[in-house]
Image (cartoon, helix red, strand yellow):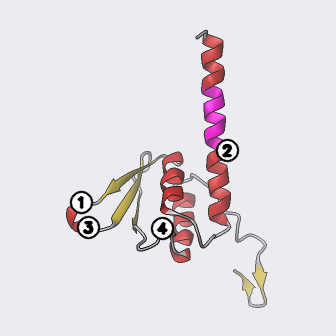
Amino acid sequence: MHSWDKLWYNLHAEVKSLSRKENLVSRLKSRPRDFSIQELDTLMSLCNCEKRNRGKTSGSAIEYIHTQTKHIYSIHQPHPGNEIKICYIKRIISFLTEIGEIQDHADVGEETSRGKL
């Protein structure tokens, strides 16, 4: 493979990865009720987080460790289903915003009769 071909291939793979991340972030921000643990694994990986099971005695506990900041997000694997509860979706958005992997503009401009959400 020539150097230009290799460069093009790597660039294409990076763009594909970015669009996958953008799609998952967009889906996450829509606060779906059917966001799966597999989608979370993929998103966290694309956001530079490593997945770690917390050990034999922790049951279904999972940690995602941001490789650059070392911040940790902990969650229990959903069971019996595969979907992550909406309260955790909000926490995941906050975590990814805090570590600088996404910008949360979902609440901007949303208002109710009592003020901003």
Mark 3 Cα-neighbour bin, 10 Å: few <14, some 14–19, many ≥20:
few
Q: Residue furthest bottom?
A: 114
Q: Which residues are magenta?
A: 10-18
Name the residue carrying label 1. Answer: 55
The span from disc 2 to disc 3 (Cα, nearest Å) is: 34 Å
Residue 58's disc number: 3
Front residue (pair 82, 26): 82
Q: Earlier in the sequence, mark 2 or mark 4?
A: 2
Residue 82's disc number: 4
Question: Hey, what amino acid is under mark 4?
Answer: Asn
Q: Position of residue 29 (x, y in %)?
A: 65, 65
Q: Position of residue 12 (x, y in %)?
A: 66, 29
The span from disc 4 to disc 3 (Cα, nearest Å) is: 18 Å
Q: Disc 2 vs disc 4: which is toward the camera?
A: 4
Mark 4 near mark 1, Cβ–Cβ under 8 Å?
A: no
Front residue (pair 81, 33): 81
Secondary structure at numbered mark 3: helix
The span from disc 3 to disc 1 (Cα, nearest Å) is: 6 Å
